[in-house]
Amino acid sequence: MVIGINCGHTVSGTVGCGAVGYIDESVEVRKVGNILMTLLAEEGHDVISCTNDYANSVNDNLSQIVNMANAQPLELFVSIHFNSGGGKGCEVFTYGGKRFDEAERVCENLNGLGFVNRGIKDGSNLYVVRRTNAKAMLVEVCFVDTKTDVDLYKKLGAAQIAQAICNAITGEITENNGGLTMGQYEELKTEIKVLKAENVALKAEVDNLKNPMIYNYIDDNMPLWAHEAVQWCIDKGIIKGTGDGLGLDDTKLWVCVTMYRLANSLN
Ligand SMILES: [Zn+2]
């Protein structure tokens, strides 16, 4: 998918910057949005940055964002914001309040992380929703001026919010993971990878047990460490083999080696 991501407003403290409460909207949208862009790119999507950091006015900021979004055909435009005004939870604005899958899943996934789901709302009057050509959604993660929202946001961290929005875009539901931090989540992912690799190795071993290697001749197929011992066993008449060859498996190779070493140590 070709996806435009906008970190809402200009940078903190400049003309057109976002709301400030317990946290600063301009700062947090950039944290969430930048991680979101990385996650989407890692999943193979074409990500277009539609963030405008400095502007002469709010309108200038908004029109620059829309110009960046409309400079190429996008399949989805996402603008990241944080709310203010003392409410609680997350909401998503779409044109005409249209309930499309990505928007529904953003609400569900942020709700899965513990935020109140305020649902999908009509964002037809919002400049970036109205003026972008692509299917658009403006995400209000939570309220910067509501302590419980901010506490939860800080506990989760920007990365987990970005992951939830990424999952919503790509079609995955984010379950409440029982309060795992992103670090613990990454650790778990690594552990699962290691387990998978071990599983593959185990399967190969089981396969080997079911179909053991048979060595009929002292040649390149036989492990080098067994050559001398097997030759000695043949010379001493300890093993004979059949017309088809020696018929030695790994265990028998080891028996030959053990006998050979024992004989050497007795001499
Ligand atoms: Zn905003």
Image (cartoon, rainbow, N blue to C red):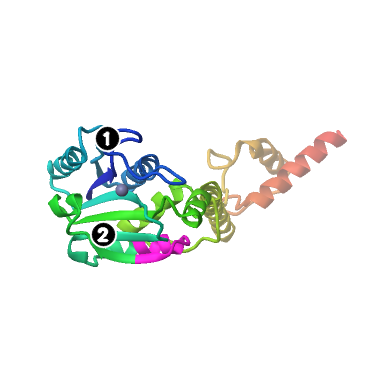
Percent x, y for residue 29? 36, 44
Judging from the image, what secondary structure is the residue with disc 1 in?
A: loop
Q: Nearer the viewer, residue 144 or 49?
A: 144
| Mark found first going from the N terminus, 1 or 2 | 1
67 is higher (above) or lower (below) than 185: above
Q: Quadrant of the C terminus?
A: top right
> Disc 1, ligand 1: is the CB inside 8 Å?
no
Q: Closer to the camera, 81 or 57?
A: 57
Q: Is residue 191 left or right of residue 75?
A: right
- Report the amino acid beneath label 2: Phe
Is 255 situated left or right of 189 in this image? right
> Which segment is the magenta one?
106-118
Q: CA distance from mark 1 to mark 2?
A: 24 Å
Q: Please tell me whether residue 114 belongs to the stretch shown in magenta.
A: yes
Q: Is residue 43 left or right of residue 49?
A: right
Which residue is the site of mark 2? Answer: 93
Where 108 sits versus 4, above or below? below
Q: Residue at x 76, y 40 (%)?
A: 260
Residue at horizontal 70%, vertical 46%? 254
Quarter-of-image position of residue 120: bottom left
Q: Which residue is mark 1?
A: 15
Queried whether the magenta region covers residue 138, the answer comes back as no
Q: Nearer the viewer, residue 187 or 85?
A: 85
Asked whether residue 238 is in view, the answer is no
Q: Is residue 245 in sight in this rendering?
A: yes
Mark 2: which secondary structure? strand
Q: Is residue 245 found left or right of 144 in the rendered image?
A: right
Q: Position of residue 169 (x, y in %)?
A: 30, 56
Amino acid type shown at disc 1: Val
Instruction: Relative to 172, say whether 189 is above or below.
Output: above
